[in-house]
């Protein structure tokens, strides 16, 4: 279903919450992802934002590929409430990043 791990999404969520301090790291992290990972990340965000339904995940990923006209990091960093949308998208897909977020916060 997703071409990205929940752990990576959790890392994006945490960095997005600290955008003032972590923008360069977040940008570099997203830029290092594969195109498949980036498309899945955008699709999860769109589902969390309500642009797509969870059962439309494949269509959302396809659309992310087709409509990618700017660098993924620019697009996502410019999206208001990015961390909330990603968490909501995961939840809609029956997943959660909270354990991964806790582990990352503890330095695991």
Image (cartoon, grey):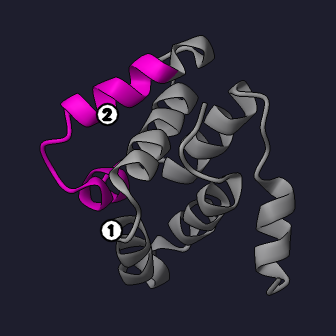
List x then y, in percent, for residue 73: 31, 60
Q: Residue at x 15, y 50 (%)?
A: 70
User: Which quadrant is home to the N terminus?
Assistant: top right
Q: Which mark is residue 31?
A: 1
Total marks drawn? 2
Which label belongs to residue 64? 2
Q: Secondary structure at mark 2?
A: helix
Horizontal side, residue 82 vs residue 84: left or right: left
Is residue 33 highlighted in magenta?
no
Q: Quadrant of the C terminus?
A: bottom right
Spot occupied by residue 78 in the image (x, y as percentages of width and height): 30, 54
Q: Is residue 95 left or right of residue 25?
A: right
**Magenta segment boundaries in residue numbering:** 58-80
> Label 1's element?
helix
For disc 2, the neighbor class at 10 Å (few under 14, some 14 to 19, many from 20) is many
43 in relation to 29, above or below: above
- Indicate whether 79 appears above or below 54: below
Graded by Cα atoms within 10 Å as few (under 14), some (14 to 19) or many (20 or more), the crowding at tag 1 reads: some
Measure how far apart labels 2 and 1 are at the Cα level: 15 Å
Give me the residue at 80% from left, 87% from top. 107
Q: Is residue 79 part of the magenta span, yes or no?
A: yes
Residue under the image location 58 percent in, 38 percent down:
2
Residue in view at x 37 percent, y 71 percent: 32
Q: Main secondary structure of the magenta part?
A: helix
Q: Which mark is residue 80?
A: none
Task: From the viewer's perspective, tell me whether residue 103 is left or right of residue 50.
Answer: right
Q: x and y percent of residue 35 in the render?
A: 33, 51
Residue 86 rendering spot, x and y as whole percentages: 58, 44
Residue found at the far left of this picture = 69
Q: Is tag 2's residue or tag 1's residue first in the polypeptide sequence?
A: 1
Residue closest to the eye, 34 or 22: 34
């Amino acid at each position: 279903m997703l071409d990205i791990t929940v752990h990576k999404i959790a890392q994006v969520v945490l960095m997005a919450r600290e955008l003032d301090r972590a923008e360069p790291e977040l940008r570099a992290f997203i830029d290092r992802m594969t195109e498949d990972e980036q498309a899945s990340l955008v699709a999860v965000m769109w589902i969390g934002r309500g642009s797509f339904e969870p059962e439309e995940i494949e269509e959302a990923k396809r659309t992310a590929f087709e409509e990618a006209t700017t660098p993924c990091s620019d697009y996502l960093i410019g999206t208001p409430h990015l961390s909330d949308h990603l968490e909501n998208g995961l939840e809609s897909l029956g997943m959660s990043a909270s354990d991964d977020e806790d582990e990352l916060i503890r330095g695991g």
